[in-house]
Amino acid sequence: MRQLSFANTRIVCRRLLWGNHHHHPSNHHYQWRFMASAVHALQSTNAEIRRLRHIRNVGIFAHVDAGKTTVTERMLALAGVIHRPGSVDTGNTVTDYLPAERERGITIQSAAISFEWGWHNHYTGEDYDANDNVEVHLIDTPGHVDFSVEVNRSVAVLDGAVLVVDAVAGAQAQTETVWRAVTRPSINNHQVEQPKVPSNQDHGHEPLPCLAMINKMDKDGCNYFNAMESLRTKLPGANPISMQLPLFRQGGSTFSPPEDDDSNPLKNITTQSDAGTTAVGQFVGVVDLIHMRSVLWPDGSRIEDCIPTIQNLLKDNNDGTHEPVCPDCPVTQAAIEARKDCVAALAEIDESIEECFLMEEDPTNAELRAAFRRATLSRRALPVLAGAALKGKGVEPLLDAIADLLPSPLDRMPPALIHNGNEEELGHSLHSSLLALAFKVVHMKGRGGSGDGRVVFCRVYSGQIKARDTLRVVTPPAPGQPVEKARTERVGGLLELAGGRFDNVEDGLCASGDVCALVGLKSVVTGDTILLDDKKNKNQQQRELVYLAGVASPKPVLTVRLETDSAQEQARLSSALSLLAIEDPSLFVEETEAATLLSGLGELHIEVTLDRLLRENGIEVRTGAPAVAYRETVTDTIETNGLVEYDKTIGATRLQAAVH
């Protein structure tokens, strides 16, 4: 449909320009007006397609303490957003801005930030000086299971994912959890065995194309190939293919850029050959298997000191063939074999590379890069890179891979709509009508524009949102319930995403494919569908039934009882909990005359909520003993002729039961 939309535009323009040539001369003036309009429409469409192709909506996912936030900080420093990367240990990172996050050294809330990065390989072959940027909208997600709702709602609005894996531990428990969230077919992350999508729409929420970064390659005991194998064995459907080889410097010497007359610039540098050998030495860089070059980083904590040195391992013979710069170099020999393995792995899933493989031809760098992109977008491969983000090593190739391999909004299907016979292609990136999803709500006193300071994060799928626009908000109903009537809201303003700092958007506009924050909305909650309130639209009543499936929330597993000292404090507690439940759909609050019960996803989840009650609202509560929500199910059935009794003593406890 994406290609057809652009092709149809060209056909319409061509007909307007050259069709109807038998018109009377008196109509030439109007024909030229049509021609000017057609040219303008074609130019506008081309500009919009170009803008969308340069957008990457990406999330960072990992097990706790795998280095997600450190990777994000290095990205921001390299992109020029910050002058110096922050540290989780010192609590000065951009995306971990809550006091509890900085004290505990973990990510609790997902945080979004935007930056630009040079698209070095865009239409330029091997030209690294190309001046072409992609706009990356990055969401840093928590790695702890207690905050899984942040992962769920981030997945619902992203186009691609980066999976960060510890080089020593490999794929861990939460790595498997986020992999299921990223790759399961669903409707806006609502897990269903067979998504019930209307007959005129044959798609649900697409699983996300993904990259993997083996981080912490500077730790003792790191093993790049063992970590890759853990991805293959623990993540169902993953097909990890290495794009790099890690490089290590033997001995205690530090890295220095090679001299121009050095016959072997990679002396004293080795690589890990297979999973059976443990890396020895200091991690200094990688071999880029696509371009067959080494990328070596010097030691240094400042971002300006970590400028990599690039050395080509092969030289061009000007006849389409290549030969090693240093034939006796062990790194070059290992890289040649690793590239052959990479080509063989891609040949199993890509027809173009398969043809080169069968003809015993070496694909060009551009062909290999294009094959990686096709395999990534189709989720038939998981490209794997290596790095040590804390030392500033390996992050630039990861940013290049995000630009080269992960999808733009044009590469994704429109979101799954639930409607009643509406045939519109609403949600396509080139569609003019507004469709957006509110995936996160926070309350910021003095910034929200509404009474409770509500700030709504949303992903715009089609159309655009401007300040002062009047919106129609539809809340997806609970299963079996009818759809409520759409509510009308007015946008007070737009905020740019910058971690914990929210700046006003200069032009006050958020276009399709972008992620932004809206202020002034009083009733919008997580999962609401946002449409433009177009009173001139004759299909207004029909469009009330058009909505997205919302965002799924995990079921609570732990419940505590909350008590205050006075009725006045109890009223303040009820008000504060209602706002926290709006921000976090995985929090459940039950108030009775006797007690207030707070349910969450774990002990840490409850602790962080109580900490926010004290810090943000000054409410100190007493808690009762936690109760775990156990779940039981029937595993077998039996037939009886009457009463079945059970009477058994286990330890000092007598268990009795009777079933009629």
Image (tube, rainbow, N blue to C red):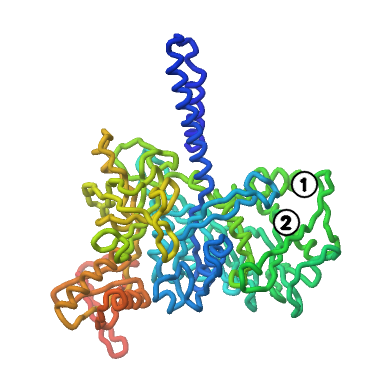
Q: Position of residue 350 (x, y in %)?
A: 63, 46
- State the CA–CA distance, disc 1 to disc 2: 13 Å
Q: How far across and how far down the image is residue 49, in percent?
A: 51, 40
Which quadrant: the C terminus? bottom left
N-terminal of the pair, mark 1 or mark 2, is 2
Instruction: Inspect this view and state whether residue 232 appears.
Output: no
Question: For the residue carrying disc 2, how many other residues have a C-alpha within 10 Å: few (<14), some (14-19), or many (20+)?
Answer: many
Total numbered labels placed on residues in the image: 2
As drawn, the label of residue 479 is none
In the rendered structure, the answer to whether residue 565 lies left or right of residue 102 reads left
Image quarter of residue 303 = bottom right
Question: For the residue carrying disc 1, how many other residues have a C-alpha within 10 Å: few (<14), some (14-19), or many (20+)?
Answer: few
Q: Position of residue 195 (x, y in %)?
A: 38, 49
Question: Which circle, 1 or 2, is nearer the viewer?
Answer: 2
Indicate the amino acid at tag 1: Glu
Left or right of residue 123, residue 107 in this image: left
The residue positioned 25% from the left and 38% from the top of the image is: 535
Tell me the number on the disc at residue 339: 2
Question: In the depicted view, which residue is nearer to us: 567 or 301?
Answer: 301
Residue 394 figure quarter? bottom right
- Mark 2 lies on a secondary structure that is helix
> For the point 65% across and 68% down, which residue is it?
306
Residue at the outermost bottom position: 652
Asked whether residue 611 appears in the rendered view, the answer is yes
Q: Is residue 18 above or below residue 466?
A: above
- In terms of depth relative to the viewer, which is nearer, 310 or 286? 310
Q: Amino acid at mark 2?
A: Arg
Q: Which mark is residue 360?
A: 1
* Element marked by disc 1: loop
State yes or no: discs 1 and 2 in contact (Cβ < 8 Å).
no
Residue at left offset 30%, top offset 48%: 468
Which residue is at 28% across, 90% downward?
Answer: 652
